[in-house]
Amino acid sequence: MEAPAPGAAQDAQSEARRRLDAYTYLSAPERLEHIAITRVFCGTLLADLSVSEVMAKLRQAGGPAAGLDADTLTVRLEQLVRWGNLLRSSHTVKASSISEYQRSRSRYQLSKLGERIQRGADGVLAEVDAAREVSSELLALVERGLRELAELATVPGGIEPQDGLERVSTLFVQFSEFADSIRDFYAYLGQVLARYDLDSAEYQGFKELLLDYVEAITEDVAFRSPRISAALDTLWPHVPGLLARVDAHAQGLSGLSPQGDGRLETRVQRSRGRELGDWEGLRGWFRDTDGQGSQVDQLRDATLRALQSLLANAKRMLRSATGEMSRRRDLLRLARWFEEAAPQDAHDIAVAAFGLHGARHLGIPPATDEVVPAYTSWWTGPVVEVPVALRERGSRAQRGRASTAEDHSAQKRRLREAAREGAAARAAAADELRSVSGRFAEVRLTSAALGLLLELLATALGNAQLRRRAGPGWAGVTEFDLNQAHSENAELGIRLTVRRTAGARCVLHSADGDLLLEDLELDVGRASSNAAEGDAEVSMS
């Protein structure tokens, strides 16, 4: 495949720019006046109008361009000519004076491109923001038309040219209307899907629209697509011959030949269905012919995305009902306050709601060891050193390459592993202490178990209460009351009770050495909550 010549590519780009310039009047500052002027020309057929005639029609119609004078209107018309929406007419002027000639010599008519753009703009402005019904009944007509056309094309002698022309034209008009309605409906559906402020009533209507109407459309398309594809497969080998017979019977504008010296070339846009490319587009709508997926597949994917969006809105509304996420009601109340407030009150509401206070400070923090109260005046407050970059360039940004953020993921992973290992070791130590309670002299504890036991013992002795025992005279003896000496760790599910018994000796053997506790007895069991749970389980069983 040869690449296009540089000159041809430049000509194509120039032609594209020229055509796009014709849309400029829709975004110009005087667009309402331009649209009113172009509508005047769209209301005529093969008519050229002068400035005075356009002015009279504008004043008759009223609107934003009704008050234009002749000079301003001439400027607007000339601008539309430069953009390509209007053409200067070659109408012969008959005038009885020079002034009449000057007023009548400039006549304008609508170009084809300008007429199509204005027609599309009027269609956009006239359409309401509502859902367009899908003409699903046309799909059944398309199926029946293809099937009948395939039967007539395969009989000996073929189809009659006039009958074939009528059937092809009807078929493509029906298909174009169906495809346009599908695109318009799903464009509206995408507009609704983009909203995340649906209330319950809107959501209910959207759910019925999606679950009922869209489901009916997709089911109808899924049902008829295989039949249409089968009819197209049968008809496809006969399509070139059918188009040739139709063209030989009724050439239309394509039969025009160059006039005069042969340098006049007329470009013709054929009716839908008269070229093979139209049939390829029809076939590609129902079947994947280029590896990009058919329109039926895209319709199925769009429906799936719509269902996912419906579920997302449902989740949002559930979270909103429980007060977890949505602030819609609060924002609506705030908006109502803004609407009803006076200008000064609206400023106060904005300050209170968003913290948008007036710019009273530069925002340069003082030294870390210097605390300045908020009520301190600038006149008496300390001087703050302004950075050179802010003083000279008015920018806080640091020059040079910013250093990359340090990655602490490995360190966090090590800390998590260490925390898990420590928790597992303490749990094993608690299990060990509970298993050897009452026979400490017979076993050797691990270092972790001994450490946990000493931790619990220190807490238990700290919880012991002091009491004074009476003695001779005013003296007395202060001693610990170990009846309340206990400690527990609910996380590990372990409880230590310390009792004081005269003459008792408790020896703790461990890998770190032996510990002798005199006049003390240790009892290790489960924590009270765990014990209660265990009792409940036993009673339930």
Image (cartoon, rainbow, N blue to C red):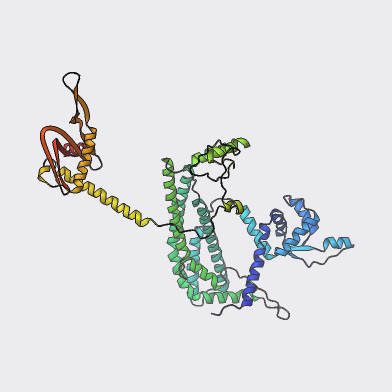
Residue situated furthest top in the rendering:
473
Task: Name the residue located 24 percent from the left edge and 37 percent from the top edge.
Answer: 459
Looking at the image, which is closer to me, 505 or 220?
A: 505
Q: Would residue 339 be visible to someone looking at this image?
A: no
Looking at the image, which is closer to me, 288 or 43?
A: 288
In the image, is residue 349 above or below residue 237?
above
**Percent of width and height locating residue 398:** 53, 56
The quadrant of the rendering that contains the C terminus is top left
Q: Quadrant of residue 301?
A: bottom left
**Percent of width and height locating residue 276:** 54, 73
**Percent of width and height locating residue 352:** 54, 37
- The answer to whether residue 529 is left or right of residue 74 is left
In the image, is residue 279 above or below residue 525?
below
Q: Would residue 443 be visible to someone looking at this image?
A: yes
Looking at the image, which is closer to me, 386 or 419?
A: 386
Task: Name the residue located 63 percent from the left edge and 76 percent from the top edge.
Answer: 8
**Percent of width and height locating residue 109:** 74, 63
In the image, is residue 10 above or below residue 320?
below
Task: Name the residue located 49 percent from the left edge and 68 percent from the top edge.
Answer: 284
